[in-house]
Amino acid sequence: MTKWFTLVLAAMLFAGTAQAAEATEAALMQAATELARQYDANYAAKNPAAMAALYAPDGVLVSPAGPLVRGHDALVEYYTKRFASGAHGHAIKVLEVHVQGDGGYGLAQFQVTVPEAGGGFREEHGSILAIYRHDPDGWHMRMVEPSVPPVAK
């Protein structure tokens, strides 16, 4: 997926977000950091339903393998398969956030241990672009796009 597509998609997502109340950068950083903490805790607990609950109901994950994972049920299915694969040890560090209206976006770094095709595991490092939305029931991730460098062969 190209960076231009991501930027256009992000602009469309922001355009569809209600502009009820302006968020502050401090509030968004606190929310993004808490969502990252919950993400890592739910990943460690291998809890697909709790993972999906971190996203907005219409949330989207651009999976590292390529396909878009859209909505609660698809996210539960994705994380169920991810955990069954043996992936573990997820850790996110939020680097920065930027407010737009009642939401915003953030950049983070992550690491996770993933299975290799031939057996065994490897540690994967990458970056995350996340779009956040403040809903009546709190902050959620509207879209998450991890970026993982190609594996050296």
Image: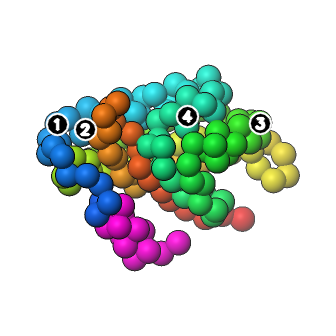
Residue 15 point in image, percent of width and height = 28, 63
Q: What element carries label 4?
A: helix
- What residue do we see at 48% from left, 43% from top? 57
Q: What crowding class fits label 1: few (fewer than 14 Cα within 10 Å), some (14-19), or many (20 or more)?
A: few
- What residue do we see at 44% from left, 43% from top? 56
The C terminus lies in quadrant: bottom right
For the residue marked with disc 3, what is the amino acid?
Ala
Distance between the alpha carbons at the discs numbered 4 and 3: 14 Å
For label 1, the residue is: 26
Residue 44 point in image, percent of width and height = 60, 26
Asked whether 11 falls inside the magenta stretch, the response is yes
Distance between the alpha carbons at the discs numbered 3 and 1: 36 Å
Numbered mark located on residue 51 in the image: 4
Locate residue 97 relative to residue 51 in the image: left or right. left
For the residue marked with disc 4, what is the amino acid?
Met
Is the residue under label 1 in contact with that under label 2 (CB below 8 Å)?
yes
Numbered mark located on residue 29 in the image: 2
Residue 75 point in image, percent of width and height = 61, 44
Distance between the alpha carbons at the discs numbered 4 and 2: 19 Å
Q: Is mark 1 on a helix, strand or loop?
A: helix
Please state the extent of the stretch shown in magenta in the rendering.
Answer: 1-13
Distance between the alpha carbons at the discs numbered 4 and 1: 24 Å
Question: Could you tell which of marks 2 and 3 lies nearer the N-terminus?
Answer: 2
Q: What element carries label 3?
A: helix
Question: Which secondary structure type mostly characterizes the magenta part of the structure?
Answer: helix
- What residue do we see at 26% from left, 32% from top? 30
